[in-house]
Image (cartoon, rainbow, N blue to C red):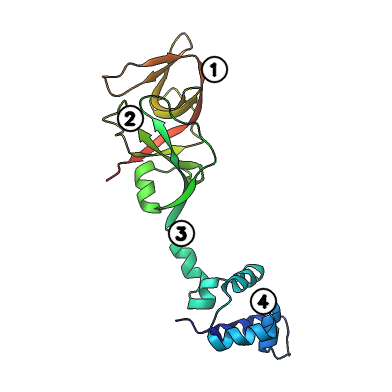
Amino acid sequence: MIDFSEVIEKLKDIVSQSRIGARVYDKDVAAELGISQAAFATMKKRNSIPYREILEFCARRKISINWLFFDQPAEMLLEETGKFFRIKYFAQLRASAGGGAEVFDENFKYISVDRDILVEIVGSVDEKNIEAIRVEGESMEPTLKSGSIVFIDRSGTYTSKDGIYVVSSTGGLFVKRLRVRADGFVELISDNTLYENEIVSPEEISIVGKVVGSMESI
């Protein structure tokens, strides 16, 4: 259990740095937190920590809340945080490997992926460009199974090299191999031979990103 009195002493040390030579009292900490002296005294007596006010105080002073409450140095937090990538995951969308799916929108959440695992899956790609979406349908099997999560490089525009891309069209989102034909039309290729390939004009689609890796659901 966190002792509010100990936290107050740390807060006094922080406040005292801007008040050289002056003693800092509970009332000074209360003022910094925007809490009345009476309310602050009651909180201290009941060991009721004003988390919201302390969080705002730490944000203003650029102080680690983990250090304040748990004595965890910022260097350790940076080291631990650096082990993970935060990438956008469009959990409500499906990149269809069959019929069309919804278009990309801003409805996403961030997921943390172990840095070593992600590099193993996608290779040396700038993580700031990586986003994730779930595949639905069987047209890209056995390469991509329905339900798999694919990692997309949003900076990956189409090249002549073989690759799988997520494309957007009036029919929704598709995940297919792309091939530009000699006549300028684009062939959307399914890896599953039970599905026919589709031929569209370049104006009918836009590249969302290149699929650089995938992870099957368990």
- Asked which quadrant contains residue 210, the reply is top left
Distance from the alpha carbon under mark 2 to that under mark 1: 25 Å
Q: Look at label 2 and name its amino acid.
A: Gly
Residues 157 and 12: in front is 12
Question: Which is nearer the N-term, disc 3 or disc 4?
Answer: 4
Depth-wise, is mark 2 or mark 1 nearer the camera? 2
Distance from the alpha carbon under mark 3 to that under mark 1: 41 Å
- Asked which quadrant contains residue 143, the reply is top left
The spot of residue 19 in percent (x, y) is: 73, 84
Residue sitting at x 30%, y 19%: 195
Distance from the alpha carbon under mark 2 to that under mark 4: 54 Å
Circle 3 residues within 10 Å: few <14, some 14–19, many ≥20: few
* Residue 33 numbered tag: 4
Q: Secondary structure at mark 4?
A: helix
Circles 1, 4 touching at the beta carbon (< 8 Å): no
Circles 2, 4 touching at the beta carbon (< 8 Å): no
